[in-house]
Image: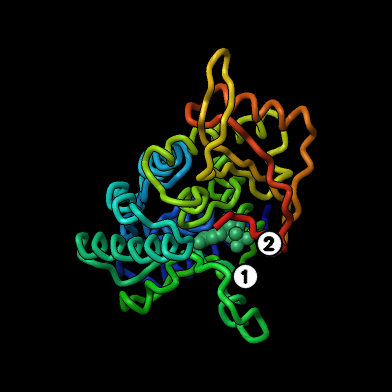
């Protein structure tokens, strides 16, 4: 796409102009936006950029490793990988209220990021993968709902707190354009085409208390579900698909034994912007294959249900 190739060159020149010889720090979330912003900025200013990946231990199976190897080994970007799993799980212990979980994770994320920024001696600029819809949303509060449905976790509070200037090269782009730019920059398809993933990660897909054990169970179920979706060629037709581990145990039978294990819900929706969503109408054979595999392969789950709720009245995530 020649327009994206041109956009890339224009932005590289702009970033160089803005930053000069300054130092830039960029938080990676594992998502497409921050990844594309980081790779573009790296192309412009090389080692003046340091990325910080705060790994909260609430990522999907294998994703933290993918982020580290892509940025460090493939692109040669300076990357601080903070393994903060214990710190996040420690703070989540005993928390069951969805908003308390969200607020803790958001606050802790900022705290860890600030500590790491200080350790590397600070920076002059903070880079963010802000997109055009984010810019619009933050100025169009009038007329919107007056209640907070969920406190979204993002790094919006960072710039003021850290007293840094912003570098936001994606501010004019929509999500689909970011994906085109990501391809242009050589990011692998599995990264560029990835479903959105919420900042608080698996913590908001485990209603009730989040523990390492429950995260591990959910990671396995989620992996199987997504593998089946990819095998069926449905991944790109779906906006978001994921498993949820419920704080409910039910009785089952495996061979000659009684089981008493957790329920797993699987969800898949189509959407254009996440504001509204429809359930994805899988056929029965597909769902039954997913249920059978999860129950057979994941210890701790003995029942699988499909979430048939559109948005509204449901939200996409369960918390
Ligand atoms: P809901 O659950 O509000 O989600 O219907 C709409 C879209 O937003 C994602 N989501 C988040 N993304 N930080 C994020 O970056 C968050 O705290 C967060 N919560 C929800 C969700 O996955 C869906 O794509």
Q: Which residue is mark 1?
A: 133
Q: Mark 1 to mark 2: distance in Å?
A: 9 Å
Tell me the crowding category of disc 2: few under 14, some 14 to 19, or many 20 or more residues within 10 angstroms, Cα based: few
Residue that appears at 26% across and 63% down:
117
From the viewer's side, name the closer residue of 194 and 298.
298
From the viewer's side, name the closer residue of 314 and 270.
314
Q: Quadrant of residue 290?
A: top right
Residue 231 position (above or below residue 191): above
**Residue 242 horizontal/vertical position (percent):** 59, 43
Tell me the crowding category of disc 1: few under 14, some 14 to 19, or many 20 or more residues within 10 angstroms, Cα based: some
Contact between marks 1 and 2 (CB within 8 A): the answer is yes
Way the structure is coloured: rainbow
Label 1 vs label 2, nearer the camera: 2
**Residue 282 horizontal/vertical position (percent):** 77, 38
Residue that appears at 51% across and 55% down:
36
Residue 196 position (above or below residue 252): below
Residue 34 falls left or right of residue 95: right
Q: Ligand 1 is in which quadrant of the figure?
A: bottom right
Residue 113 falls left or right of residue 299: left
From the viewer's side, name the closer residue of 72 and 220.
220
Whether residue 75 is visible here, answered yes or no, is no
**Residue 247 horizontal/vertical position (percent):** 50, 45
Question: At numbered mark 1, what does the secondary structure look like: helix, strand or loop?
Answer: helix
Residue that appears at 58% across and 38% down:
264
Residue 203 position (above or below residue 229): below
Q: Which residue is mark 2?
A: 273
**Residue 223 horizontal/vertical position (percent):** 54, 34
Residue that appears at 43% across and 41% down:
215
Residue 90 falls left or right of residue 240: left
């Amino acid at each position: 796409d020649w327009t994206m190739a041109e956009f890339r060159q224009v932005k590289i020149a702009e970033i160089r102009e803005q930053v000069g010889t300054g130092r830039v720090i960029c938080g990676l979330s594992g998502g497409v936006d921050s990844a594309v912003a980081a790779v573009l900025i790296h192309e412009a200013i090389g080692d003046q950029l340091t990325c910080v990946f705060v790994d909260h231990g609430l990522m999907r199976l294998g994703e933290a490793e993918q982020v580290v190897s892509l940025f460090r080994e493939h692109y040669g970007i300076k990357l601080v990988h903070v393994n903060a799993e214990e710190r996040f799980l420690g703070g989540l212990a005993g928390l069951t209220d969805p908003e308390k979980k969200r607020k803790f994770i958001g606050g802790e994320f900022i705290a860890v990021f600030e500590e790491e920024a200080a350790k590397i001696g600070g920076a002059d600029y903070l880079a963010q993968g802000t997109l055009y819809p984010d810019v619009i949303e933050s100025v169009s509060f009038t007329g919107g709902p007056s209640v907070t449905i969920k406190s979204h976790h993002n790094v919006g509070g960072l710039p003021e707190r850290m007293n840094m200037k912003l570098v936001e090269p994606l501010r004019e782009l929509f999500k689909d354009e970011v994906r085109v730019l990501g391809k242009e920059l050589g990011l692998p398809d599995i990264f560029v085409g990835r479903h959105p993933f919420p900042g608080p990660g698996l913590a908001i897909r485990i209603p009730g208390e989040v523990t390492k054990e429950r995260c591990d169970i959910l990671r396995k179920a989620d992996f199987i579900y997504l593998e089946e979706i990819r095998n069926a060629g449905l991944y790109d037709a779906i906006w978001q698909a994921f498993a949820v581990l419920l704080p409910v145990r039910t009785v089952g039978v495996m061979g000659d034994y009684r089981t008493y294990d957790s329920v797993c819900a699987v969800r898949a929706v189509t959407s254009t912007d996440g504001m509204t969503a429809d359930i994805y109408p899988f056929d029965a054979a597909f769902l039954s294959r997913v249920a059978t595999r999860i129950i057979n392969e994941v210890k701790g789950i003995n029942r699988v249900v499909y979430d048939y709720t559109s948005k509204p009245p449901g939200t996409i995530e369960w918390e």
